[in-house]
Amino acid sequence: MRKPGRATQIFASAVFAIAMALPAGWTNAATSKGDYVGKTPAEIVKSLERQGYKVGELETERGYFEVEASIDGKWYEILVNPETGKVVKIGKDD
């Protein structure tokens, strides 16, 4: 087996340094406005949990699913359109 070349070692070091410099939230999957998360409460919970969220409450409000979920110790309120299954709004929940 060949030893890795110098270029390979430099590349691996650079990738590691970049990964370590990223904010912690970037290393975890997180949902954004416009992402598809599901059209039913069960689909939404499953999708968010796969992304690393801990789902608290999920209720229907003003025709949308309103989800309280946390990731990396921060709580978010996520509004999902039940017709499209897409996130229409996400914001920090105090």
Image (cartoon, rainbow, N blue to C red):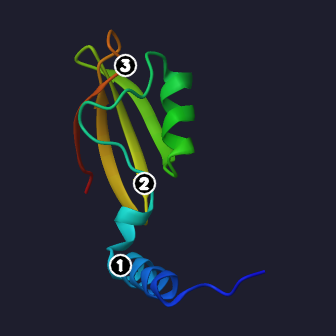
Task: Give yes or no for contact between labels 3 and 1 (Cβ–Cβ under 8 Å).
Answer: no
The circle drawn on residue 87 is: none
The circle drawn on residue 85 is: 3
Q: Residues within 10 Å of mark 2 (few under 14, many from 20)?
A: some
The circle drawn on residue 70 is: 2
Query: Can you give x and y, in whole percent of width and height, for residue 63 in the image?
Result: 26, 13
Q: Nearer the viewer, residue 21 or 82?
A: 21
Q: Residues within 10 Å of mark 3 (few under 14, many from 20)?
A: many
Q: Distance of mark 2 from mark 1, alpha carbons?
A: 26 Å
Q: Element under label 3?
A: loop
Q: Earlier in the sequence, mark 3 or mark 2?
A: 2
User: Which residue reaches farthest top?
Assistant: 83
Q: Quadrant of residue 46?
A: top right
Q: Quadrant of residue 27?
A: bottom left
The quadrant of the picture occupied by the C terminus is bottom left
Query: Can you give x and y, in whole percent of width and height, for residue 15 in the image?
Result: 42, 77
The residue indicated by pointer 1 is 18
